[in-house]
Amino acid sequence: MDKGKIFRDLHKTAFIIPNPWDIGTAKLLASLGYKALATTSAGYAFSRGLADGAVGFEAMIHHCRELVGATDLPVSADLEKGKGDSAERAAETVFAAEAAGLDALHGHLDPLRIIERSVMDIFHGEVAAVSSFGADSAVLLHMVSEIDRSLPIIFLDTGKHFEETFGYRDALAADFGLTNIQVIKPDEAALARVDPKGNLHESSTDACCDVRKVQPMARGVEPFRAWFTGRKRFQASTRAALPVFEAVGSRIRINPLAHWTTADQAAYMRAHALRENPLVAYGYLSIGCFPCTQPVQPGEDARSGRWAGHAKTECGIHLSGLEKSLTDASL
């Protein structure tokens, strides 16, 4: 169903478009025969006991996602100022709305179907996958290979990987017949400037991740409209509300496995006899660069071995830093 075409066609004649303020009113209005719905920023704010304009952008995007998923009708979104008044911020607002709509329409599907629709239809020819070839990487890569073995797979060689990571990368590529592994490395001039001795991680893990991960990753995904990751909600508190489709500036990041559990992951690995990263057997349940990764003790969170002793829980390629680096890479 092409909701965009349906909505455009409605404009060929006069029609009434009512304003639901929650899922219940959206369903009620759809049952009354209306052909489209429009969000109401004031109505939604008032329903929450807030003044008009007092609802934050992310809350409004979440509201839009709920309304799109509530019925089969097209939804026109009132986002007021969105992320800002500049052309760049207006574009980011549009892409955030697109991601919310995609999440409502497709986020409930099984991961393989999400990947198939994204590759074959929604982002045809403009999507890649990002993989660390870490502890949980085999499932997403196997699913990608079931749809398109020539899909670009972006692998970030930070210069600090375990040797086992490279061996695992090559083994999975052979197992799945992946033919388009794209290796991205940090900029040599940037490394010479900020990490000439290769020990920046000892004084600033954030700065090290920025030059070795965030900046190169921005260059890696910049040619694409969208990319897949293997992130899941159970992996960290920072991922607990992870959507399947999310906007990163003017691009879309797709997390097909967002709602999977450790049991889902293990069951898929067994069902398809997938090769496990050899470091997992030694207690490395989340694998990054060797200076900042250690084995996890029994009962600990899977990511507790990353940057142990620091408040840091994410390298930055999945946070707002990538959005800024993407903007810089596009200049």
Image: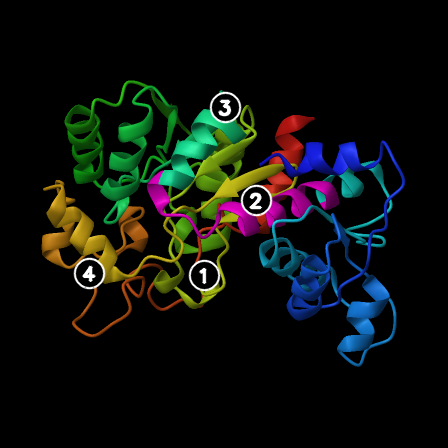
Residue bearing mark 4? 295
Q: Residue furthest bottom?
A: 49
Q: Nearer the viewer, mark 4 or mark 1?
A: 1
- Please tell me which of labels 4 and 3 falls first in the chain: 3
Q: Secondary structure at mark 4?
A: loop
Mark toward the viewer: 4 or 2? 2
- Disc 1 and disc 3: Cα gap in Å? 27 Å
Q: Is residue 42 above or below residue 143?
A: below
Does residue 97 appear left or right of residue 204 in this picture? right
- Please check the rendered image and state whether residue 111 is part of the magenta-colored stretch, yes or no: yes
Q: Looking at the picture, how far across and down is residue 165, in whole percent?
A: 22, 38
* Badge 1 or badge 2: first in the primary sequence: 2
Would you identify the image quadrant in which residue 45 lies?
A: bottom right
The three-letter amino acid code for the residue at tag 2 is: Leu
The answer to whether residue 293 is magenta is no
Mark sitting earlier along the chain (4/1): 1
- Viewer-nearest residue: 258 or 13: 13
* Residue mark closest to the camera, 1 vs 2: 2
Contact between labelled residues 3 and 1, with CB atoms less than 8 Å apart: no
| Front residue of 99 and 68 | 68
**What amino acid type is highlighted by mark number 4?**
Pro
Give the residue at mark 1. Answer: 239
The residue shown at (16%, 47%) is: 269
Residue range highlighted in magenta: 93-112
Residue under label 3: 124
Residue found at x 78% / y 38%: 88
Labels 4 & 3 near each other (Cβ < 8 A): no
Task: Give the Cα distance between marks 4 and 2.
Answer: 37 Å
